[in-house]
Image: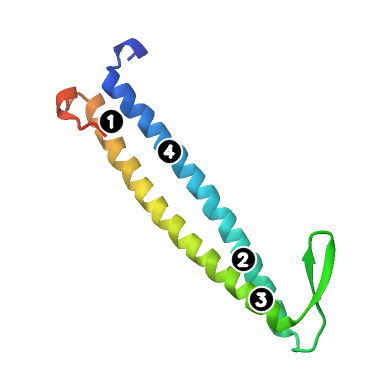
Amino acid sequence: MSKEEIPPWLREQLARFEQLQQNLQAILMQKQQVELELAGIEKAVNELKKLGPDDVVYKSAGPLLLRVKRDNILSELEEKRELANTRVMVLAKQESRVRESVRELQMKIDEAIRGRTRPSETQAS
């Protein structure tokens, strides 16, 4: 089937399908980045918990290292962990919704290509 043979309504659906796939890829990349950040936070929290409350801890602040209290940095990391977990949950829900949209549109396009539907039977999205 050449480009001229593809009806405009089907071309629109194919373009929408491609856009949904790109959105899905962007969501997956964001989710992976947040999961990596979360893993780093977990590792830091575990190491800090091994230290005593009076042990010296330094925090990077740009080009500087600042001496901080262990409990303060633990509290800060716990907050970051909560935020990262929430972000992962939100991205997982987005991923699920977009995957479902991709699946539904794929079925719709497959049916149209097989000739089971006509332009009047498809729903404009």
Provide the residue designation for mark 2: 39
- Secondary structure beneath dot 3 equals helix
**What distance separates the C-alpha of mark 4 from that of mark 3?**
36 Å
**Marks 2 and 3 close (CB-CB < 8 Å):** no
Q: Amino acid at mark 1?
A: Ile
Q: Residues within 10 Å of mark 3 (few under 14, many from 20)?
A: some
Give the answer, above or below, for where 16 lies relative to 82.
above
Amino acid type of the residue that numbered disc 4 sits on in the rendered structure = Gln
Q: CA distance from mark 2 to mark 1?
A: 39 Å
Q: Residues within 10 Å of mark 4 (few under 14, many from 20)?
A: some
Residue 33 seen in this snapshot: yes
Rendered residue at 26%/25% (across/down): 113
The residue that appears at 15% across and 28% down in the rendered structure is 121
- Are dots 4 and 3 in contact, CB under 8 Å? no
Which residue is under mark 3?
45
Q: Does the CB distance between marks 1 and 4 fall below 8 Å? A: no
Sequence-wise, the earlier of marks 2 and 3 is 2
Observer able to see residue 46: no
Residue furthest out toward the right: 64
